[in-house]
Image: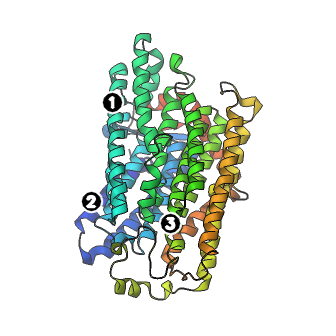
Amino acid sequence: MSGIADLVIAPVLLPLLAGAGMLLLNGERQRAVVAGLNVAATLALVCIAAVLLAMSDTGTREVYRLGNWPAPFGIVLVLDRLSALMLLLTNVLALASVVFSLARWHRAGAHFHSLFQYLLMGLNGAFLTGDLFNLFVFFELLLAASYGLLLHGSGLTRVKAGLHYIVVNLAASLLFLVGVSLIYGVTGTLNMADLAARVPTVAPESRGLLEAGAGVLAVAFLLKAGMWPLSFWLPTAYAAASPPVASIFAIMTKVGVYIVLRLSLLLFGEGAGASAGFGSDWLLWGGLATIVFGTIGTLASQDTARLGGFSVLVSSGTVLAATGIGQAGVTSGALFYLVSSTLGIGAFFLLVELIERGREPGADVIAVTREAYGDEDEVDEAEGDVGIAIVATMGLLGVAFIGCAVVIAGLPPLSGFIAKFALLAAALNPGDRSGAVPGSGWALLVVLILSGFATLVAMSRAGLRIFWASPDRTVPRVRAIEMGPVMFLLMICVAQTILAGPVIRFMQATAQSLHAPAGYVSDVLQTGARSGRHLEGK
């Protein structure tokens, strides 16, 4: 086996090797080399993910069997439209975050770049893996890296939030193990495709235990996704993280959302027999409650970083509620919204540090520590001409702030509005209401409209406070390497708006394949070569 199919494992191998190599270059004189290696590896991951997305868009599904062992006995990585989409989204956001960190944040503590690559390895592996055991492995890997990244830069607020974050995620890991053990005890397998084939044949006396295991497993993922009332930890942790870390963390909640979406349709879809639709009502109403909770949080937030944290909850709740409705059209709109909201929130977390920097003369932003800036002389020398404070800086920051607000609130003409329109149009479509909870579409409509209005109010209030209410504030010194990643993410949102037709068609094909998982099951369980290309349902 050779050729382009080998790229399926590259998103896991490349960050593994890059992270290990950077650990060997652990010296003050080698800092620039390590930073360059991190940027190069992340840029390569973006290119690889783009190629994989193009491969999946042809309607093929790549199944990579490590060691050439057939499923369910061996480890498999599965590339389809959904996993390719999440790979590209993850690594694009990572590229913006790592470039932003080069301004100063990577100097705030040890091993930032290695931890960053291991986080990407865990994220990429979680999106590609085809079995629950290796999902747990990648899940733990990304969590371990996230612990170090959240604590990066130290400071009392960050350490306190980081310790809470660690405790919560250790509890989630324990629940993960309990749920997986129950499922394995009933079915005798952890391969996702094999589970999908066995769930309909589970004996009636064992089905309760199976569903209990699935419920415990769902709690672990929903804790990570931030579904209410399991979301108490998220706004504080994200607000305390350094800007580049908070930005990449915007995709981490989507890991839980991705697994819930994948497993709910694969294991408990229409072909699951007596367990068909298991947990869908909980996802619907839990998602709506999460949107409401996040909306209240955005209105109550007096800090822009916490405003971003509550916006993450609104984003996760919207996709979870759409998953609970269980319609292919709603799922496609939710995927469009997932991409748009994640990019917008990631850009907002990067922007927060820049717009807050000049609010008080001589004071740095929110939880910025002295370690993040290093020695003052070093920073001034490094900034040079690109760090000169000019009045036009405020204009550029204001435009970026408005762009983030429009995307996150879902206002026209950017991609957030198109995503919500597509989602609600499908949810209210009378021709596609089979099996849906009565009134679910209207409930989602009301909640999303109120949420968008509340986000607009909160963003407007924050904008007035930052750009208008402090006429004596100093103009912040913003470097091109800081402003570039923010504009890069917003320009992708603009491109998603311009190319809305092709993007929506891709999302529709992705949703249709998710709601018809028979092809996924047959491709993964077939015997033969290590990697094969198979036509994916359109």
The percent coordinates of residue 185 (x first, y second) are 32, 21
Q: Mark 2 points at which residue?
A: 20
- 314, 213: nearer the viewer: 314
**Earlier-in-chain disc, 1 versus 3:** 1
Q: Tell me which corner region of the image, top left, top right, bottom left or bottom right, holds residue 168.
A: top left
Residue 118 visible in image? no
Q: Mark 1 points at which residue?
A: 178
Q: Is residue 366 above or below residue 418?
A: below
Instruction: Name the kind of residue labelled 1 in the image.
Output: Val
Q: Is residue 314 above or below residue 152?
A: above
The Cα atoms of the two marked residues, 1 and 2, are separated by: 32 Å
The Cα atoms of the two marked residues, 1 and 3, are separated by: 37 Å
Instruction: Name the kind of residue labelled 3 in the image.
Output: Leu
Q: Are dots 1 and 2 in contact, CB under 8 Å?
A: no
Can you say which quadrant of the picture contains the C terminus? top right
Can you say which quadrant of the picture contains the N terminus? top left
Q: Mark 3 points at which residue?
A: 350
Q: Residues within 10 Å of mark 1 (few under 14, many from 20)?
A: some
The percent coordinates of residue 286 (x first, y second) are 55, 36
**Earlier-in-chain disc, 1 versus 2:** 2
Residue 418 visible in image? yes
The Cα atoms of the two marked residues, 2 and 3, are separated by: 27 Å
Q: How crowded is mark 3: few (under 14 residues within 10 Å), some or many (20 or more)?
A: many
